Amino acid sequence: MNGLDLAPLWLTLRLAATTTLLLLLLGLPLAAWLAHSRSRLRPLVDTLVAMPLVLPPSVLGFYLLLALSPANAPGAWLRELFGVNLVFSFAGLVIGSVLFSLPFMVQPVAAALSGLPPSLREAAWTMGKSRLATLLRVELPCVRPALVAGVVMSFAHTVGEFGLVLMIGGNIPGVTRVASIAVYNEVEALNYPAAHAYAAILCAFSFAVVLLVNLLRRRAERIA
Amino acid sequence: MKPTLLSLLALCAAAFANAAPVQVAVAANVQYAFADIAASFSRDTGIAVQPSFASSGKIATQIMNGAPFELFLSADNEFPQKLAQAGFTLQAPKSYALGALVLWSKDPQFNPRQWQQWLAAGSGKVAIANPRTAPYGSEALRVLDYYRLSASVTPRLVSGDNIAQAAQFVVSGAAQAGFVAKALVLAPQMKGAGRWVDIPAASHQPIVQDMVLLKPAAANPDARKLFDYLSGPAARQILQRYGYRLP
């Protein structure tokens, strides 16, 4: 364990936290829309949100590499807009992770929201609450277990990301070398002690996360 | 009808005779050259070859953990040596090629004559193979050191999982330039993609590429035939065509 480079672990936590925060901002409105909309676009959006569950990370990685590359139009445009290259950068990994973990945030929350009785929202509206206030003050507190599950699973899924980062990360220490990549590097370099250390930490973390989600679910079932 | 049936039988017999293709693990820098060598070998001998391509480090790890490869063409001489010391080989490793590095870019500003100045002044990412698992990566770092380019280039380095991914970063334009194996830019598949310049061999350690026969080859005499073929005139000619020097 001595001399284990902790930077990949911190980077992983930073990536997962940033991704989860962005998913809360983007995912919750999307989940609310999916839960309540009667639009004909809804099945389409529903499908797109679920796509990362079945797509191989290499497909997403390949498209993102081309999209973010400064040699292609979207990447060049983003570079002009933000002044940075997104491929091989922390920001690029965040974009990839948000797309990749989107269903883990949106799906449980949307399912829970659509399970709430409509009278709840309608009562709030008649008392003069706006749609946003209703979502934030009435609906979301009612689906707290789903919300917590979404947050925890998004966070954990980002920690577990590998193929996507391998394709668009470029393995830069402190910028894109996350823990899963660090394990892979150490195994390839035949440095098993370091690989074991990273792997054990990730195992303990995953165990804690899944346990937490299970405990929350049981508590929610008891309350319901 | 009869000739068809006969030829079908002959085909079946041939298929049975060649039931086990030679399982070869090949370092990514040799992938295009090896495909040509394997085709030539199969044409000459009727023996099928099944190659897998990866970084030398990954292949060595896989072999140490029971991968059923019979022959390993490494990008260096250290991984085969490690395998020999650990008892995974049938005999001592043998050099089959000396690798060459090139700097490669699709940037229209790229000036092969003054590549050092261009590289130092640039701001885009520079792709190399993972220096810890791929010799072309570690030698690229030596080149940067030699030309005192480390300070300006190191912060812009991105490493590919193997030399082929480093090349792919250049082809997709995601990286502005890359240090890759000459064999990759000379491959017909890469023709017309950007320009490249030879890196003087004096600026880094020679990239001595060794191959070694592995334990599973004991049961397959065809593996040894391919091993010998790789030192023969046909294979040497192909290797030279892909920019390798010969040991």
Image (tube, coloured by chain):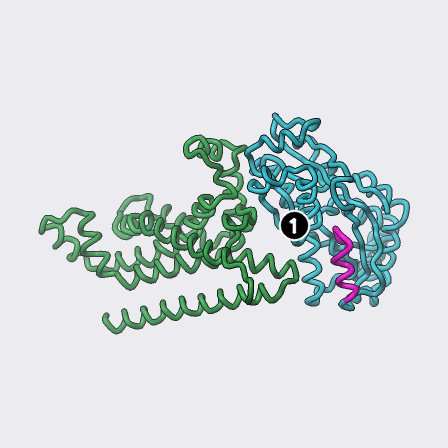
Chain colours: A green, B cyan
Q: Quadrant of residue A81?
A: top left
- Residue B12 image point, x, y percent: 81, 59
Residue B239 lies, with reference to residue B225, above or below; the image says: above
Residue extending farthest right: B233
Q: Position of residue B58 (x, y in %)?
A: 67, 57
* B76 in magenta: yes
What amino acid type is highlighted by mark number 1?
Pro
Q: Position of residue A209 (x, y in %)?
A: 40, 66
Direction from residue B28 to residue B9 in the image, left or right? right
Query: Tag 1, which chain?
Result: B
Residue drawn 78% across and 66% down?
Answer: B85
Which percent across, then down, holds residue B16?
81, 62
State whether the magenta stretch is mostly helix, strand or loop: helix
Count numbered badges in the picture. Answer: 1
Picture quadrant of residue A137: bottom left
**Picture quarter with the N terminus of chain A:** bottom right
Whether residue B218 appears in magenta in the rendering, the answer is no
Q: Is residue B168 left or right of residue B32?
A: left
Can you say whether B120 is above or below A154 in the image?
Answer: above
Local secondary structure at mark 1: loop
Kindly identify the residue that appears in the image at 70 percent across and 52 percent down. B53
Q: Quadrant of the C terminus of chain A?
A: bottom left
Q: Residue at x 55, y 56 (%)?
A: A181
Residue B245 vs residue B165: left or right?
Answer: right
Can residue B21 be seen from the camera position used here?
no
Nearest the eye: A138 or B164: B164
Give the quadrant of residue B165.
Answer: top right
Residue drawn at (36%, 55%), measured in percent from left and top? A105
Q: Nearer the viewer, residue B76 or A46?
A: B76
Is residue B161 visible in the rendered structure shown here? yes
Question: Which residues, given as a range, are shown in magenta?
Answer: B73-85
Which residue bears the numbered disc 1? B131
